[in-house]
Image: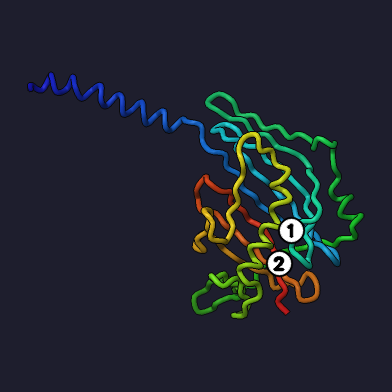
Amino acid sequence: MNVKTLKNLIQPCLLAIFLTLCSAAYATPPRYVSITDTPIAANETHVFLIRNVSDNEGSHYINNTHRFLVAQSLQTGAVDDQCLLDITRHIYDDSTNTIETLPAPTGEVDFLKLLKQRNTYPLAMGLTTTWDGSTDTLIIQNRFKLTKQGLHYNGTLVMPVKVLQLKIAANLNPTMHIMPTDLGLIYLLILNDNSYTVDLNNCVVHGSDALISAGQRLVYLSCDDGGYDVAGYQIYLTVTTE
């Protein structure tokens, strides 16, 4: 077989491989949802957070963000009240980049008014830091640690893993239940032994030394495995540490 014949055979194969790779790259992606919470206020019974739920709707070119005000019980950690504030729709492709914010279907919501009605006070989250003069660096002192046994504070187990699982579910399920499912079901990363087991290496915990009520602290929990099979999240859980 001469070089010209070999070249004629290889070229169609390379073209086929190229087209296959391009087709895979532009194929419809799976639906991916991520949740990010920001604590803003508290009262004697609840902490109030702005919850952003980002949803690609199974498309390369769409990202919708549902923004909620959620009320999370200090006692149980469950979200027992929530209000959809607005939806920001981002559509983009090679020729279009459109961002539109729509009010909730029930109408515009003044969440500051809602917070005032619940007798809340502003909540500032901060991490405890110290200055290491020998190295001129700022060190974050994280008193929380996540292990296979659960959540620890200053070396003491304060939330066994089974309780942590229930708190995560109680925190996220109320919001997930009202997200549209016609584009596909949403599976959450949860710390158990089913097919969506989370490797603890995919989770990060940080806590605040500020007490938001007697013996109660907020702990930041971020879990994301970097894949599209399950929804990642950045939430805050209430923990009894004293």
Name which quarter of the figure residue 142 lies in. Answer: bottom right
At 84% from the left and 65% from the top, the residue drawn is 45
Q: Nearer the viewer, residue 233 or 192?
A: 192
What secondary structure is marked by label 1? strand
Instruction: Residue 65: give x, y in percent of width and height.
Output: 68, 41
| Residue type (three-letter) at the residue carrying disc 1 | Pro
The quarter of the image holding the N terminus is: top left
Name which quarter of the figure residue 4 lies in. Answer: top left
| Residue type (three-letter) at the residue carrying disc 2 | Leu
Name which quarter of the figure residue 10 lies in. Answer: top left
Between the residue at mark 2 and the residue at mark 1, the CA separation in whole angstroms equals 9 Å
Q: Which residue is mark 1?
A: 39
At 71% from the left and 55% from the top, the residue drawn is 38
Residue 6 falls left or right of residue 175? left
Residue 40 falls left or right of residue 97? right
Q: Could you classify mark 1 by the number of other residues whose Cα lies within 10 Å: few (under 14), some (14-19), or many (20 or more)?
A: many
Q: Nearer the viewer, residue 110 or 69?
A: 69
Q: Which residue is mark 2?
A: 218
The image's mark for residue 91 is none
The quarter of the image holding the C terminus is: bottom right
Instruction: Residue 72: give x, y in percent of width and height.
Output: 77, 59
What secondary structure is marked by label 2? strand
Mark 2–mark 1 CB contact (< 8 Å): yes
Q: Nearer the viewer, residue 149 or 28?
A: 149
Instruction: Residue 209: give x, y in percent of width and height.
Output: 69, 73
